[in-house]
């Protein structure tokens, strides 16, 4: 009896919940003896949300098709940019495609072999060079160029990335723009800054006998990545007492690495392409090191700046002087922003805070990389478990509308990855296909899925580039 009284309250609550749940499924008024039971539905809010979210997803799918007067074909839906025939949605920008500067650079590369460079920022969706490796190879195959581009000194994904083989010592001090203890640091383009081991006396210091180092080896994943044609090291302010001891295929070189700029460049070249690079950093005084770039003299280059768990808002933490200095060397023609996974949440319905923050990010990029076009890529499909089945996270359509609004307000290009994947519930089909395109977390694509996204993006970019060339030739002919 005592045991029953002990659990009596819990039993009453359980029975009450069971009765309300049962009544919810009836979902109408009825008479039970002397009592009139009103209509109750415990799940009404959830069901209403799901219906509304499905409708939102459908409306996004339709709303984000290119406008009828766009130069794009209907098959290219999802890639939305203003063209010379469609400027009304871009705050009065007259006769300028948001990708005009990028396409001009591509045209010069195609005609003259000039360099075109892309900075591709993203979260874990591009980690390990996913998406970007396929896009890079496709563009280099068409426009020329070889090399993986910029690689940070250390990386969480060095063992996962296939486009370069990288190892490094464990005595690097690492700071990132998501680490609160690093606030105010001079973060590089990747959001990281690395500090090598320092020593006081180069002749006898134990620390100098164990310098911080990094090794790179060419990759056979793609034919244009097995050899290094030009190796460039990027570092911060440095005194004459600091130097690097590096090897190119076993050939040893020693160079002082002084520098007065916030970002400095040291070019290491050999008489012929090499496959192995090792760099030892002997720092008598503290210094910042950012990364190494692998490239050829001509062609197109794409730098992967992935950062796990990032919303994109942290990009304003990269100091303006750093962005400007990097851009002085790289001369970026296109900046791609692919974020959203770490912002979406099934319970989120308002992304005004994110819209405000990303507009600041885009303006930060415009001010400090002024000659680059900017392309905003929407979040892709992501599923959550609703009762006993997976379906599109209800916040995804709302977030996409927000991202489109960001692009329109800032006058930049926009590509709808959600549509490209297939729209509502496409993630479920990607996970459940015979050859899965995504992982069982119903969030991240795998190598096959990343390749598909990259090829869809590449096709839309090249279609729009061809439209640009047609308009360019027509305009030149009209003025001749």
Image (cartoon, rainbow, N blue to C red):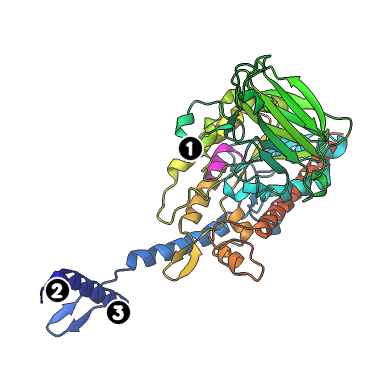
Does residue 362 lie above or below 8 as drawn?
Answer: above
SS assignment at label 1: helix
Q: Is residue 74 visible?
A: no
Q: Which residues are magenta?
A: 405-412
Q: Residue at x 58, y 33 (%)?
A: 192
**Quadrant of the drawing holding the N terminus:** bottom left
SS assignment at label 2: helix
Instruction: Decide which of 119, 199 is in the foreground and name it.
Output: 199
Q: Is residue 351 left or right of residue 411?
A: left
The count of marks equals: 3
Does residue 36 lie above or below 56 as drawn?
Answer: below
Residue 251 found in image quarter = top right
The residue sitting at the right extreme is: 271
Instruction: Decide which of 175, 98 is in the foreground and name it.
Output: 175
Q: Earlier in the sequence, mark 1 or mark 2?
A: 2
Asked whether the beta carbons under mark 1 and mark 3 sit within 8 Å of each other, the answer is: no
> Which residue was labeled with disc 2?
3
> Which residue was labeled with disc 1?
357
Residue 164 found in image quarter = top right
Of circles 1 and 2, the one toward us is 2
> Which residue was labeled with disc 3?
26
Q: Is residue 63 visible?
A: yes
Magenta: predominant secondary structure element?
helix
Q: Earlier in the sequence, mark 1 or mark 3?
A: 3
Does residue 234 lie above or below 242 as drawn?
Answer: below
Does residue 154 lie above or below 8 as drawn?
Answer: above
Q: Residue at x 63, y 27 (%)?
A: 289
- Distance (Cα) linking label 2 and label 3: 35 Å
Q: Earlier in the sequence, mark 2 or mark 3?
A: 2
Structural crowding at the residue carrying mark 1, measured as other residues with C-alpha within 10 Å and reported as few (<14), some (14–19) or many (≥20): some
- Residue 452 within the magenta-colored segment of the rendering: no
Instruction: Decide which of 49, 307 is in the foreground and name it.
Output: 307
């Amino acid at each position: 009896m005592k045991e029953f009284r002990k659990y009596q309250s819990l039993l009453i609550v359980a029975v009450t919940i069971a009765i309300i749940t049962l009544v919810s499924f009836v979902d109408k008024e009825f008479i039970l003896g002397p009592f009139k039971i009103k209509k109750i539905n415990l799940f009404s809010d959830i069901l209403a949300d799901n219906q509304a979210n499905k409708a939102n997803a459908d409306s996004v799918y339709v709303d984000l098709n290119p406008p009828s007067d766009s130069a794009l074909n209907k098959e290219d839906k999802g890639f939305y940019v203003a063209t010379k025939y469609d400027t009304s949605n871009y705050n009065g920008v007259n006769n300028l495609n948001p990708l005009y500067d990028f396409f001009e650079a591509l045209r010069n590369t195609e005609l003259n072999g000039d360099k075109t460079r892309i900075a591709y920022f993203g979260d874990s969706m591009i980690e390990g060079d996913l998406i970007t490796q396929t896009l890079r190879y496709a563009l280099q195959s068409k426009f020329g160029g070889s090399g993986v581009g910029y690689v940070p000194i250390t990386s969480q994904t060095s063992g996962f990335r296939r486009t370069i083989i990288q190892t490094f010592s464990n005595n690097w001090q690492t700071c990132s723009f998501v680490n609160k203890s690093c606030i105010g640091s001079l973060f590089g383009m990747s959001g990281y800054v690395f500090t090598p081991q320092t020593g006081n006396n180069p002749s006898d210091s134990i620390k100098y006998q164990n310098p911080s180092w990094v090794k790179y080896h060419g990759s056979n994943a793609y034919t244009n990545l097995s050899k290094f044609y030009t190796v460039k090291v990027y570092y911060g302010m440095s005194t004459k007492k600091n130097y690097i001891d590096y090897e190119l295929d076993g050939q040893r070189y020693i160079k002082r690495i002084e520098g007065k700029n916030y970002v400095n460049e040291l070019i290491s070249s050999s008489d012929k392409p090499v496959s192995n690079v090792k760099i030892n950093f002997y720092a008598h005084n503290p210094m910042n090191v950012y990364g190494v770039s692998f490239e050829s003299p001509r062609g197109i280059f794409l730098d992967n700046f992935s950062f796990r768990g990032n919303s994109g808002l942290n990009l304003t933490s990269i100091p303006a002087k750093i962005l400007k200095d990097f851009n002085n060397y790289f001369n970026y023609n296109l900046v791609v922003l692919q974020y959203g996974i770490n912002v979406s949440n099934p319970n989120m319905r308002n992304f005004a805070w994110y819209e405000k923050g990303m507009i600041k990010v885009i303006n930060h990029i415009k001010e400090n990389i002024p000659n680059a076009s900017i392309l905003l890529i929407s979040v892709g499909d992501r599923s959550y478990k609703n009762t006993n089945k997976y379906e599109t996270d209800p916040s995804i359509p709302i977030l996409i509308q927000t991202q489109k609004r960001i692009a329109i307000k800032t006058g930049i290009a926009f590509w709808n990855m959600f549509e490209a994947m297939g729209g509502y519930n496409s993630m479920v089909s990607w996970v459940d296909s015979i050859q899965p395109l995504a992982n069982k977390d119903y969030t991240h694509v795998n190598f096959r899925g990343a390749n598909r996204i990259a090829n869809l993006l590449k096709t839309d970019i090249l279609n729009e580039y061809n439209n640009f060339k047609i308009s360019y030739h027509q305009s030149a002919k009209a003025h001749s």
